[in-house]
Structure formats: structure tokens, C-alpha cells
Amino acid sequence: MAESPFLRTVRDAIRVRHYSIRTEQSYVDWIKRYIYFHNKKHPVDMGEPEVAAYLTHLAVKRNVAPSTQNQALNALVFLYKIVLNKPLGEFNGIVRANKAPKLPVVLTQTEIRDVLKHLESPYWLCACLMYGSGLRLMECMRLRVSHLDFTHRAIYVIDGKGAKNRVVTLPDDLIAPLQQHLAKVKSTHDKDLSDGYGDVYLPHALSRKYPNAGREWGWQYVFPASRRAVDPRANVVRRHHFDEQAVQRAIKHAIRAADIIKPASCHSLRHSFATHLLERGMDIRTVQEQLGHSDVRTTQIYTHVLQRGGRGVVSPLNGVL
């Protein structure tokens, strides 16, 4: 089914600002749901009351998570401010989804070792980078070859969460496995080039400024997809990065195979990285920089995990039994 001209305009506004394709898909989907919720009424004829009603519906009827409600709000704020040039004002009577405080799920080093035993490359390498360097899943997937600095034992995270850049540590034990992995990736890239392909997506319209850069080795993904596919934006056959859902499934399977009952996930590897650094005496500001947190209070959540029991309180039952 052909997309409406209005949603096409929304997509164009998102793309001209170089938002990621996931943000584009998310925003368009939320805007479409908002329109259908109000019986296909055009957004230009609606405003704050309708937005508040929809967000309240998500919290009360759909029981969505706070982050989901905020995502919908961000999409609608973008719609009115950027697309319609009609910024939203105050929201009265909106019901906010409750956000209960959560402690991060942290694995012990023994548990990390058991999980890694049940992973094969490239999943093993991805898990090692998330635990050994504190990378988020998508930061790992979007790594380019030029982002790895073996000489200085560093990984350059470019355009990470919040469009921020940072430098994180590259574990010594991963240098040889990564170089072996890159040799295989280089072979695949050379084959793509010989077949007349080999182009990769470049951010921020760099492909127009440097037409041949997308075929250069340094711009290739460290974890490329197993097959080429059509880029939905440029309508060009390219090799994108690895499917992050495949990594999530592999790590979930490894966690179950290791008989770990904690509700752990890929992100638990990053949580474990931060917690284990603090356990070894690393100062919290350094850990904050490694994680890319804007506010040290976000990093301080890991200090709660370090405390024994509830706030380090020793039970009076100890010594009685």
C-alpha cells in the first residue's frame, strides 16, 4: 500500500536531519497510530488535548512502559514542532506511566565466563566487546573498521547514544581474535568489490561529499551482515551491519545454557563491565566516561549493586544460627 503524502513529508523531515532509520520507523509508526486513534483526523486540526488524550490512553489502557510513552511523546513533539511548525504547549491532565526504580542486572565474572563458553564467533566477539569495553548493543553493531585502534588499545565510539562520541578501552585479549575476524571480513569485502558492490552506508550525507568513501575498507562494519540487501533509503544494494536481534537471541540462549536464572540480557554485559570496574577500585568519573553517561548520577546506580545486601546492612541473624 502506498504511503500517504503527509507521512512522506514526515519521513523527509526526519531524513534531512540525519536521524537513524530506527528513529524514522519509530516516529512514523507513532504518528500513524496517533492519527488512527483519533479516527484519521489530520494532525493539523488537533493539538495539546488530543496529544494528552492519546498519551493517557497509552498509560491507562495499554499499560505501556514509561520509556514507550516518552517515545510516543517525542514523535508527536517532532511532528508538531518540525513538520507542522505548530509547537505544542502545556499538557493538562495527562496520566504518566509509572516508572519504578530498577537495579541493573549484573553477572559475576564466573557467570560471564560461563556465558562466553556457550557462544561462537561472531556472537562471542560481540559479547566480549560489550563486557570488555562497556559497549551498548547498537554501538557494537555500528562499529567501523577505522574505529578500532590496536596500537593505543582504544575503540572510538562515534555517534553513540545521544549523538555523543567517546573513547573506550580495547581489551588486550581481544586484539588477536579481532584481527583474525577482520581478515575474514576483509575477504568478504574484497569479494563484494569484485562483484561490483562493496558500498556501505555513510552517515550525514558523507557519500555525497566523498563518493568513493563507502567502498573503502576503513568505513566497513566490523560485524557485517551475512548477505547484501537493498538500502530502503537509498535504494542501493549494500552490506549493512549484523542483525542485532540475532545477537540478542544468541546471548539469551547462552544465558539459559549456562543455567543462569537472573533476567539477564545483552545490556547486562555492559552493567557488569561498570560494576566490575568499580569493584576493582576504578573511580566513578572514569567509569562515567567509559559508559558515556552525561550525568554521574546515572553511573552511581552501580554503587548500589556493590553494597552487600540492602545498603550494606549486616543481618542480626548472622552468628545466631
Image: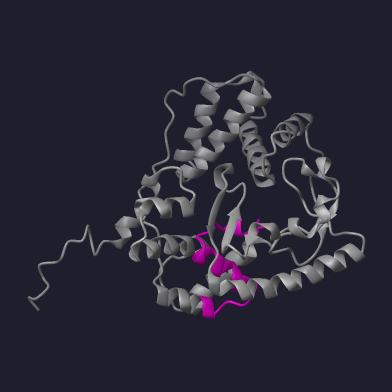
Residue 256 among those drawn in magenta:
no
Q: Check the image and tell me how it is coloured.
A: one colour
Question: Where is 106 relative to 45, above or below?
Answer: below
Magenta region's main secondary structure? helix
Quadrant occupied by the C terminus: bottom left
Left or right: residue 52 compared with residue 224: left
Q: Position of residue 258 (x, y in %)?
A: 47, 79
Q: Residue at x 61, y 46 (%)?
A: 159
Q: Quadrant of residue 179?
A: bottom right
Left or right: residue 164 compared with residue 214: left
- Residue extending farthest to the left is 320
* Residue 77 appearing in the image: yes
Q: Residue at x 57, y 29 (%)?
A: 77
Question: Where is 3 relative to 167, above or below?
Answer: above
* Residue 41 appearing in the image: no
Q: Position of residue 211 (x, y in %)?
A: 85, 46
Q: Quadrant of residue 173?
A: bottom right
Q: Position of residue 163 (x, y in %)?
A: 59, 42
| Residue nearer the viewer, 18 or 168 | 168
Magenta residues, as a range? 116-143
Q: Residue at x 53, y 80 (%)?
A: 117
Q: Quadrant of residue 193?
A: bottom right
- Residue extending farthest to the front is 151
Q: Residue at x 55, y 53 (%)?
A: 167
Question: Where is 319 relative to 148, above or below?
Answer: below
Quadrant occupied by the N terminus: top right
| Residue nearer the viewer, 24 or 167 | 167
| Residue nearer the viewer, 63 or 16 | 16
Q: Position of residue 17 (x, y in %)?
A: 69, 34
Residue 123 among those drawn in magenta:
yes
